[in-house]
Image (cartoon, rainbow, N blue to C red):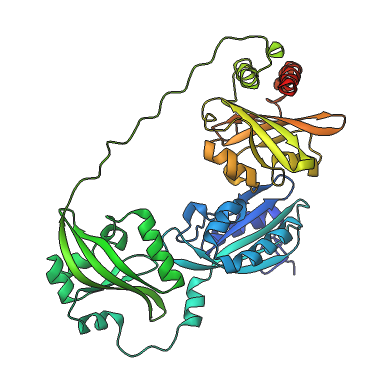
């Protein structure tokens, strides 16, 4: 009797068949599966899952350490950083962490990774949301009354919202009377709509207090109908009900306020980008801004780069200084200094690359991409290193605001610019030394 080599019950599926077979099943799980190329510092999503409250930022936990340090609870950071070090060494590792999601909730995440058996430069793994399991495990004994029943024990306005999805789940008669709404109308809007009249930092402070202290007291604005806002002194408590995280709002001193439209008079339209001058001799210039501008004007046609960065590398002092030119790079401070660790220069030297192509910065795990390129709208770039007496001193980075701009073939034409660039750079450095 023969076995079907493409069946589940028979021998293992061939790699291509297996990937095609398992993909639909991955999207049914509460986990995002990923693959990291250690050499290219690139992360690839294997399926389309997003962690609730993190959304499109889910992958940034592994890509952007600044973001990770912002959302991961401080007590969990050392374990997460130790996990990332193991992954970058291509070792199996796992960690359970707590994160402050964009919606103010706290979520428990498990992250695990292993060496990729098919690719020696890669690791693969997943990020899964374990919040409900942890909450069920930690849930304390409850009395028989549900939270929907408890609101009616109070004479002052009280309502309850689900911490996870921000839906209003209960409101007492005092609240309906005070705000002039029916019960169905009171439960219809989400908590974010009701609290929309409060500044973002105020709400952030409230949610942080609820996560860490489980309570908050103060004065806030509430709004059930567009035409009227209310100011109220409120006591908010984080409570548990049947395994769910809830927010209990108890209101006092409720006062109606006139509703005023937001003041948008301070908004200023962005200016159009400046046009560039005509072609001049790059090698005869001794001004770095002019050199970069002329390189952009004289790049091979069709022009692929809309920005250009020169990196002055000083690995000995652990610093890299950058100078930029082009639309979108105007906010880059001339001579801006950043650490050598996590830079393009470090990546090039560690893996002995003759150049570096990045097709999409938002897939990167390099700190410099998230600190420098992504905030300026750069989606792809081509980096060319130059050496002096065997030491990496210079990197020229052609930037594009579109992904997948540069390829191994189309960057070859840029080599015609390098001699003039190095000549002009030498003149600029000489002028710098002269003061």
Q: Can residue 110 be seen in the rendering of this structure?
A: no
Outermost residue, front side = 435
In the image, taking residue 74 as reference, residue 83 lies left or right, namely: right
- Residue 422 rendering spot, x and y as whole percentages: 75, 20
Q: Classify residue 178 by image quadrant.
A: bottom left
In this view, 406 is above or below 100: above
Q: Residue at x 63, y 33 (%)?
A: 381
Q: Can residue 140 be seen in the rendering of this structure?
A: yes
- Residue 347 rendering spot, x and y as whole percentages: 74, 43
In this view, 354 is above or below 12: above
In the image, taking residue 403 as reference, residue 169 lies left or right, namely: left
Work out which quarter of the rendered image holds the N terminus and state it: bottom right
Is 109 or 117 nearer to us in this picture? 109
- Residue 121 rendering spot, x and y as whole percentages: 76, 50
In the image, taking residue 284 as reference, residue 175 lies left or right, namely: left
Q: Classify residue 17 by image quadrant.
A: bottom right
Is 119 or 78 nearer to us in this picture? 78
Work out which quarter of the rendered image holds the C terminus and state it: top right
- Residue 12 rendering spot, x and y as whole percentages: 72, 63
Q: Residue at x 27, y 64 (%)?
A: 219
Q: Classify residue 371 by image quadrant.
A: top right
């Amino acid at each position: 009797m023969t076995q079907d080599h493409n069946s589940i019950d028979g021998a293992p599926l061939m790699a291509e068949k297996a990937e095609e077979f398992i993909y639909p099943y991955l999207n049914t799980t509460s986990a995002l599966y990923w693959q990291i190329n250690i050499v290219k510092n690139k992360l690839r999503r294997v399926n389309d899952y997003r962690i609730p409250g993190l959304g499109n930022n889910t992958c940034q936990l592994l890509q952007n350490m600044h973001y990770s340090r912002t959302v991961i609870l401080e007590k969990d950071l050392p374990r997460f950083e130790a996990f990332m070090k193991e992954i970058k060494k291509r070792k199996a590792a796992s960690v359970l962490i707590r994160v402050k999601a964009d919606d103010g909730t706290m979520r428990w995440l498990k992250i695990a990774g292993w060496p990729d058996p098919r690719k020696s430069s890669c690791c693969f793994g997943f990020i899964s949301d374990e919040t409900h399991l942890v909450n069920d495990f930690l849930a304390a004994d409850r009395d028989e009354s549900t939270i929907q029943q408890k609101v009616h024990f109070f004479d002052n306005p009280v309502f309850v919202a689900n911490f996870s999805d921000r839906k209003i789940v209960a409101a007492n008669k005092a609240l309906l009377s005070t705000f002039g709404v029916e019960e169905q109308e009171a439960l219809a809007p989400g908590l974010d709509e009701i609290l929309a009249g409060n500044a973002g930092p105020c709400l952030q402070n409230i949610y942080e207090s609820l996560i860490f202290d489980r309570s908050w007291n103060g004065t806030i604005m509430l709004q059930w109908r567009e035409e009227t806002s209310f100011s109220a002194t409120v006591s908010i408590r984080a409570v548990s009900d049947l395994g769910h995280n809830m927010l209990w709002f108890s209101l006092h001193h409720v006062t109606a306020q006139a509703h005023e439209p937001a003041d948008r008079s301070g908004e200023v339209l962005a200016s159009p980008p400046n046009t560039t001058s005509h072609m001049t001799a790059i090698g005869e210039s001794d001004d770095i801004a002019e050199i970069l501008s002329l390189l952009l004007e004289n790049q091979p046609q069709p022009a692929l780069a809309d920005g250009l960065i020169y990196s002055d590398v000083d690995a000995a002092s652990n610093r890299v200084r950058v100078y930029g030119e082009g639309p979108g790079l105007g906010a880059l401070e001339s001579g801006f200094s950043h650490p050598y660790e996590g830079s393009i220069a470090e990546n090039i030297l560690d893996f002995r690359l003759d150049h570096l192509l990045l097709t999409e910065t938002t897939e990167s795990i390099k700190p410099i991409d998230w600190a420098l390129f992504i905030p300026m709208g750069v989606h792809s770039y081509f980096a060319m290193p130059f050496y002096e007496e065997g030491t990496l001193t210079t990197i020229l980075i052609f930037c594009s605001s579109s992904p997948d701009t540069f390829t191994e073939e189309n960057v070859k034409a840029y080599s015609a610019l390098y001699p003039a660039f190095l000549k002009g750079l030498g003149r600029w450095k000489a002028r710098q030394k002269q003061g």
